[in-house]
Image (cartoon, rainbow, N blue to C red):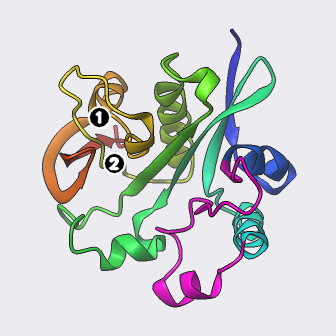
């Protein structure tokens, strides 16, 4: 399989939508906005078309809101990430607190199409996000994954990422959060981008 990871820019919005839109019309979907917008704006984004349009606007900004993974030319995965100081919910979070004052970029969540899971796309997306953050001057990038301890857990609960994928890409555990997913504490895993 041929994998390509690229920034989720406006000209690729249809592929972002293919991964983030609900599979059944009328079903609620967060469009990876729950961490990006404040509670007031989240309350205003009540309908599917409104959420879709807000994500489209984000893809038009100078810093892409995520990376897309293509497998053999088809959209197969997404990672939501960006400068922590630009992610409102992280700024106000009581469960994922800053470890220090380093202006890190944060990896928020993953969406991987069911047909492409367990094929290493999380690592590919992390690699792409890391390179993009480095190119945009980030001193470090971090994520808040769970350690599955080798157990197979529901993919829907692993949207935050798994520690083994982060570790394989050179991220190191530097702490724990007060947040959980799949009933497990989420770690703080960071990779320095400064030589």
Task: Say which of 136 and 77 sits in front.
Answer: 77
The crowd level at tag 1 (other Cα within 10 Å; few <14, some 14-19, many 20+) is many
CA gap, disc 1 and disc 2: 7 Å
| Location of residue 131 with respect to 151 vertically, above or below | below
Q: Secondary structure at mark 1?
A: loop
Q: Which residue is mark 1?
A: 171
Q: Residue at x 69, y 71 (%)?
A: 51
Upstream in the sequence, badge 1 or badge 2?
A: 2
> Label for residue 93?
none
The image quarter containing residue 46 is bottom right
Q: Residue at x 14, y 51 (%)?
A: 176
Q: Secondary structure at mark 2?
A: strand
**Percent x, y of residue 193:** 38, 42
Name the side, left or right, on which 119 lies relative to 74: left
**Percent x, y of residue 33:** 56, 67
Q: Confirm or deny contact between disc 1 and disc 2 (CB under 8 A).
A: yes
Name the side, left or right, on which 191 lies relative to 8: left
The crowd level at tag 2 (other Cα within 10 Å; few <14, some 14-19, many 20+) is many
**Percent x, y of residue 74:** 79, 27
Is residue 43 covered in magenta? Answer: yes
| Location of residue 150 with respect to 160 vertically, above or below | above
Task: Say which of 78 and 30 sits in front.
Answer: 30
Residues rendered magenta in the picture: 20-47
| Location of residue 34 with respect to 59 vertically, above or below | below
Is residue 129 covered in magenta? Answer: no
Name the side, left or right, on which 133 lies relative to 4: left
Q: Residue at x 44, y 77 (%)?
A: 88
**Percent x, y of residue 92:** 32, 80
Q: Which residue is mark 2?
A: 142
Q: Residue at x 33, y 34 (%)?
A: 162
Secondary structure predominantly adopted by residues drawn in magenta: loop
């Amino acid at each position: 399989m041929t994998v390509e990871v690229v920034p989720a820019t406006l000209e690729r919005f249809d592929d972002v939508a293919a991964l983030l839109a609900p599979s059944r019309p009328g079903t609620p979907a967060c469009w990876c906005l729950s961490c990006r917008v404040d509670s007031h704006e989240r309350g205003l984004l009540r309908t599917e078309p409104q959420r879709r349009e807000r994500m489209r606007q984000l893809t038009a900004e100078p810093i892409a809101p995520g990376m897309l993974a293509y497998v053999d030319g088809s959209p197969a995965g997404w990672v939501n990430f960006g400068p922590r100081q630009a992610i409102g919910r992280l700024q106000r979070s009581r469960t994922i607190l800053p470890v220090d004052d380093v202006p890190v970029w944060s990896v928020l969540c993953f969406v991987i199409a069911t047909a492409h899971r367990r094929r290493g796309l999380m690592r590919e997306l992390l690699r792409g996000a890391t390179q993009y953050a480095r190119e945009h001057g980030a001193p470090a990038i971090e994520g808040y994954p769970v350690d599955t301890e080798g157990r197979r857990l529901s993919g829907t609960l692993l949207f935050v990422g798994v520690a083994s994928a982060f570790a394989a890409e050179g991220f190191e555990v530097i702490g724990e959060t007060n947040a959980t997913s799949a009933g497990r504490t989420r770690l703080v895993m960071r990779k320095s981008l400064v030589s």
